[in-house]
Amino acid sequence: MTAMLEISHVTRRFEGLVAVDDVSFMLLRGEILGLIGPNGAGKSTLVSLISGTLAPSSGDILFEGRSIVRLPAYRRARLGIGRTFQIMRPFPGLSVLDNVAVGALFGRGGGQVQMARAREQARAQLDFVGLAKNIDQRADELGGPGRKRLELAKALAMKPKVLLCDEVMAGLNQVEIEDVIEVIRKVRNEGISVLVIEHVIKAIRSLSDRLLVLNHGVKIAEGDPGRVLSNQTVVEAYLGKRRA
């Protein structure tokens, strides 16, 4: 299968701290890749390196075979890399509809989309994620589950080829988690490759085609979810050697 993303020996240092340490992997076309690891493993940092909000200290990042490591975040977004954020910050005072329209204005094809067209695209994505009834509500009035869906809609309005999801299921109950899983599967069925960071192991196991595991910034496992989650090194990373 064709690789949409190729991460090659990427490292990110913050002064004396190595947050991501010589990590390499591929995200294939039409794949859902789960990214897991204990707190502080470097998962969100890795997503920020791919999306361009952080620059790697070394290594390369290829998107559809082209190096993007020197491109700013907005250029990567216009090529087709969208992301959600772990800390949800909707644009205050704007409606749900206009929050998502911003994604349409600045995503793939951005700069050529008029506001009327952006709102039309936003309505389609809000319907897709199940927020059609909230389009006129102020985005900062949404509860936690609604904000999670809003994050997805904003990212999808950018027309990504690759979607990076940072803990879109955190804080949700089981029914809400199942709803988000269904949305992500629908996203993949639209031909979008998805990288998902998640701590809900049961959910990420059922959702992912493959799993990638980081610990202290180092890749410690990659492959079939069942095999990865039974890997002793992975078990020890989550539970500690005494409890594993």
Image (spheres, rainbow, N blue to C red):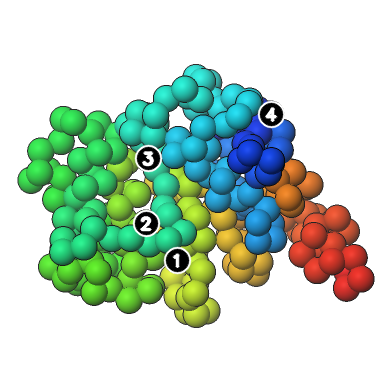
- Tell which of 89 and 205 is nearer to you: 89
Tell me how far mark 4 sits from mark 2, CA to CA: 29 Å
- x and y percent of residue 94 in the render? 16, 61
Q: Looking at the image, can residue 184 be seen? A: no
User: Which amino acid, by three-letter code, is at mark 4?
Assistant: His
**Residue underneath mark 1:** 180
Residue depicted at 65% across the width and 56% down the height: 40
* Circle 3/circle 2 CB separation < 8 Å: no
**Residue underneath mark 3:** 160
Circle number at residue 9: 4
User: Which amino acid, by three-letter code, is at mark 3?
Assistant: Pro
- x and y percent of residue 240 in the render? 84, 66
Looking at the image, the residue that sits furthest to the front is: 15
Q: Is residue 10 above or below residue 128?
A: above
First in sequence: mark 4 vs mark 3: 4
**Quadrant of residue 112 in the image?**
top left
